[in-house]
Image (cartoon, helix red, strand yellow):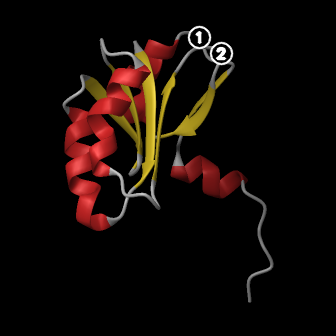
C-alpha cells in the first residue's frame, strides 16, 4: 500500500525517525520530512511503529496515498510516484525550465 508519511520532528529525534520510516518498505523522499513508502502495513500500524519518535509538540501524519494526484518535484521520486496510480499533473522539476519561465521579481 502506498503511504504518505510526513512529520515535524526536532533534530534530536529526526535521524531515528527517518531510519524508522525507511525500514517500513521501499521508499522515496519527497522532502526531508515527507516520504512515499510502499508498505504492507496499514496507516495505524505505521503510526504505532513511528509515534515513539515524536514529542508532544511535534507531529506525524500517515496517509494512504491514492490517485488522482498532482506533483512538482525531483525526477528521482518518479518511480515511487507510480505506486499512486495515474496523475492529474506530474511535472518533473527542472531548474533550468523553472528559472527561465518564472516571472522576474522586483529584486534590487
Q: Which residue is mark 2?
A: 68
In 3D space, how far apart are the residues under numbered discs 1 and 2 (Cα atoms)?
6 Å
Q: Is residue 24 depicted above or below 29 in this figure?
A: above
Which numbered tag is attached to residue 86? 1
Q: Quadrant of the C terminus?
A: bottom right
For the view shown, which residue lies furthest in the front direction? 56
Q: Residues within 10 Å of mark 2 (few under 14, many from 20)?
A: few
Left or right, 37 with respect to 64, comes to left
61 vs 27: above or below: below
Q: Earlier in the sequence, mark 1 or mark 2?
A: 2
- Which mark is on residue 46? none
The image quarter in which residue 13 lies: bottom left
Residue at 22 percent across and 39 percent down: it is: 20
Quarter of the image for the N terminus: give it.
Answer: top left
Residue at 32% of width from left, 31% of height from top? Answer: 48
Q: Nearer the viewer, residue 2 or 83?
A: 2
Q: Residue at x 60, y 33 (%)?
A: 71
Q: Element at badge 1?
A: loop
Mark 1 and mark 2 in contact? Answer it, CB < 8 Å: yes
Q: Quadrant of residue 37?
A: top left
Residue 66 % position (x, y): 56, 15
Which residue is depicted at the point 72% across and 56% down?
102
Q: Quadrant of residue 80?
A: top left
Q: Mark 1 against mark 2, which lies toward the viewer?
A: 2
Amino acid at each position: 500500500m502506498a503511504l504518505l508519511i510526513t512529520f515535524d520532528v526536532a533534530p534530536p529525534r529526526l535521524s531515528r525517525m527517518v531510519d524508522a520510516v525507511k525500514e517500513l518498505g521501499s521508499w522515496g523522499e519527497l522532502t526531508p520530512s515527507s516520504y512515499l513508502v510502499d508498505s504492507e502495513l496499514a496507516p495505524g500500524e505505521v503510526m504505532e511503529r513511528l509515534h515513539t519518535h515524536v514529542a508532544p509538540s511535534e507531529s506525524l501524519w500517515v496517509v494512504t496515498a491514492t490517485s488522482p494526484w498532482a506533483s512538482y518535484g525531483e525526477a528521482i521520486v518518479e518511480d515511487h510516484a507510480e505506486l499512486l496510480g495515474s496523475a492529474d499533473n506530474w511535472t518533473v522539476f527542472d531548474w533550468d525550465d523553472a528559472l527561465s519561465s518564472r516571472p522576474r521579481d522586483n529584486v534590487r
